[in-house]
Amino acid sequence: MSVVENIIKQHSNPGRDSLIPILQAVQEHEGFISRESVIEIGKALDLPASKIYGVATFYNQFRFSPHGKWVVQVCRGTACHVKGSAALLSRIERELGISAGGTTRDGLFSIEVVACIGACGLAPVIAVNGNFHAKVSPDDVPEILRNYRNQTVEGTK
Amino acid sequence: MIKIEVNKRQVEANKGELLLTAIRRAGIKVPTLCHFEGLPPSGACRLCVVEMDGRLIPSCATTVADGMKCQTHSSKAVRARKTIIELLLADHPDDCLYCVRNGNCELQTLAEEYGVRTRRYQGEKSTCHLDVSSPALERDPAKCILCGKCVRVCEEVQNVSAIDFAGRGSKTRIETAFNEGLNMSSCVFCGQCIKVCPTGALREKSSIKEVLEAIADPDKVVVVQHAPAISVSVGEAFGLKPGSECSGPLNAVLRRIGFDKVFDTSFTADLTIMEEGSEFLARLKGKGKLPMITSCSPGWVKFAEEFYPDMLDNLSSCKSPQQMMGAVIKNYYAEKANIDPKKIFSVSIMPCIAKKFEVTREEMLTDGVPDIDAVITTRELVRLMKMRGLDLNSIEPEPADNPLSLKTGAGKIFATSGGVMEAALRSAYHLVTGKELDSLDIKAVRGLEGRKEAKINIEGTEIGVAVVSGLKNASDLLDEIRAGRNDLHFIEIMACPGGCINGGGQPIGVTPEAVAGRMKSLYSIDKSEKYRASHLNPDIQKLYKEYLGEPLGHKSHKLLHTHYTKRDVVK
Ligand code: SF4
Ligand code: SF4
Ligand code: SF4
Ligand code: FES
Ligand code: FES
């Protein structure tokens, strides 16, 4: 039985209302919402794929590609916003050539936008696989990313 | 009847109706962008606001109440509307000069009417990409104002749901699932979304350029066919009253544009009836599945292949009249006129967007040669005529060319929902009984209703027939059949509500009254034709005698019939 089938089975009367909990459960199990899952959920709930995709893209919490090896979380909470996290995010997006929620083609990096991560004193903050980087300016971004990229290369040697 | 007060004047309103409806009936103009006649209000655009007790309320989402008082053009209401328009323009590509909707765009008209002369808001321009993946229509999300009408027609009228809102806030856009493009989606290319879109965000994929190139090529013989719906629709673009019959001027205009031969698709509508009528009788005698369902609407055919693959055997194997004409031109006509079929460039003028897709189906090649080379819609035809400075009002009518133009009333009414059924029954009756129907008018299948049903007696056999248009109506009927309903023998399905007279390729901004006018005109042409049943068409009889042999025969099978396959699309 597929992951989606399993999850849907746990809902007593699956319909439109259960869509979001189902999407959450699928993401929890698989790390992201795949195209196949959307289609499968659509068949089970009798909802068009375009609608499920529409609902899922409405919420920041859902992603449509698997996580990269390094997950760059960019805080967009109030304190970080005041300290320029918008410019920081767009620099990261530009350096990696993907937008928030996406994963680079080589599978190394993905970007995630998060709300306050409780380190407001260090704003703007990013966290890469849980490692915090404080007071990051857009110009720091290439260096930070290079470090993680190099770690990967060494790791595979 | 209740009384309300609009702009300090008494206005009568019907209990339970929308304030907007009452205001409009009183002849007062209140603009709307998201309002969709016949569907529940969505209240998305706020353009329809009126002032009531000092507050602005959306008239499209408010039910009238006795004694209600409102101002439609108070300074507050007008200012609010103007601001909305200015905000819509903030991230709009100011592209009017290059836009297909230049001159009939609702956004452009509103900006003009509300006197927008300066850019008060500067927004980030949309970076969305053009979706040109489909053979039939293009989406330009940068011009989209998110009124949601396309989403509604696709879901609530057509039951397809190929597109929906995605993302949120300033990043909201209309997308197919996974933003993969229309060609990967379940879109059936009916084009109904184009007709409701207030802007140039949705449009047909134009073939004007290819057509003009072919005309300019001295080595090509460029032939054209016009569908039965065209002659009763195109006149409106030249100020004629809806439904005005323009076949004669249209033939003349097409020759001026440079087409070498002009044929009338009504002729192959008659041919379709000969084949389909015979197929129906064969099925009645046990050869094949019942109910038989018509297959001349390519949007419907794609819908069936996607959503009802279990019922594909119920579809008639007949090609559509467009494709039959294409095959007849490149085979019978080419042989008769001694022209190398490879030199023929065959154009069809259709009220339909899905026809552009139909010609690309690989089943529509005969011996590797496409039956039709290019399809243009009524809208593109009008553009072509304007480009050449031609006007239907000031041209002497001319007949279409032999031998593929003699039509019957039966062929002509193909353009309306119910017409194929009526035409088929006239000939089926003859095929069974050898006699003609006492009354050729089968009124039960006429009209603009989404579903019509009737029982017809052919020499003691009762035939159950149903006619549906609009794919939501089709789904409802097919679901009944899936659930076991078995009193129907023959079903006509057209993708567009009302049939081709309301096709996705027809002029933008048609009113239901105009569609009714086109329908009325078709039935009066039918009444006045010398021949009113397809089997009586002398040129059709000749075509069988000289070339095809008999309906469902070997040649027919090769040229005029096709097959369908289940389609896996994202749905
Ligand atoms: S959609 Fe309308 S306003 Fe926008 S560019 Fe086209 S004509 Fe102009
Ligand atoms: S063409 Fe028809 S099916 Fe395709 S998106 Fe538009 S309304 Fe939906
Ligand atoms: S594409 Fe057209 S109909 Fe659809 S939401 Fe945008 S403006 Fe409205
Ligand atoms: S706002 Fe960024 S850590 Fe609190
Ligand atoms: S028309 Fe009333 S809110 Fe859009």
Image (tube, rainbow, N blue to C red):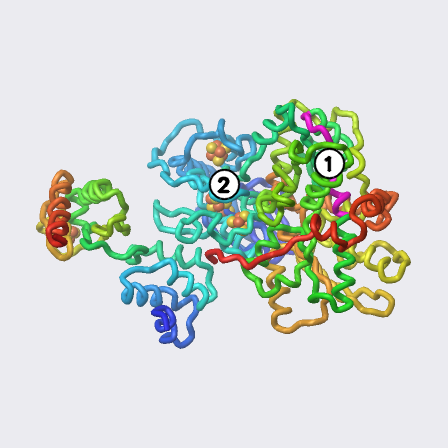
Circle 1 sits in a helix, a strand or a loop, which is it?
A: helix
Residue at x-position 74% and y-position 50%:
B555
Question: How many numbered marks appear?
Answer: 2
Chain bearing mark 2: B
Q: Of the residues tagged 2 and 1, which is closer to the observer?
A: 1
Residue A2 in the image, given as x and y percentages of width and height: 36, 70
Frontmost residue, B72 versus B448: B448
Q: In this rendering, is residue B295 above or below B235?
A: below
- Seen in the picture, residue B151 relative to A142 is either above or below; the reply is below
Q: Is residue B82 left or right of residue B553?
A: left
Where are the magenta residues, as a range? B257-270
Residue plotted at (37% across, 38% down): B126
Q: Residue at x 30, y 55 (%)?
A: A65
Viewer can see residue B48:
no
| Badge number at residue B471 | none
Q: Residue B229: name its quadrant.
A: top right
What separation in Å lies between label 2 and label 1 (alpha carbons)? 34 Å
Q: Which residue is mark 2?
A: B138
The three-letter amino acid code for the residue at tag 1 is Ala
> Relative to residue B537, is residue B79 drawn left or right?
left
Q: Residue at x 10, y 50 (%)?
A: A133
| Category of crowding for the residue at label 2, using alpha-carbon neighbours closer than 10 angstroms: few (below 14), some (14–19), many (at least 20) | many
Residue B518 forms part of the magenta stretch? no
Residue B481 drawn at (x, y percent)? 64, 69
Say what amino acid the circle numbered 2 marks: Glu
Mark 1 highlights which residue?
A: B334
Left or right of A41? Residue B153 is right
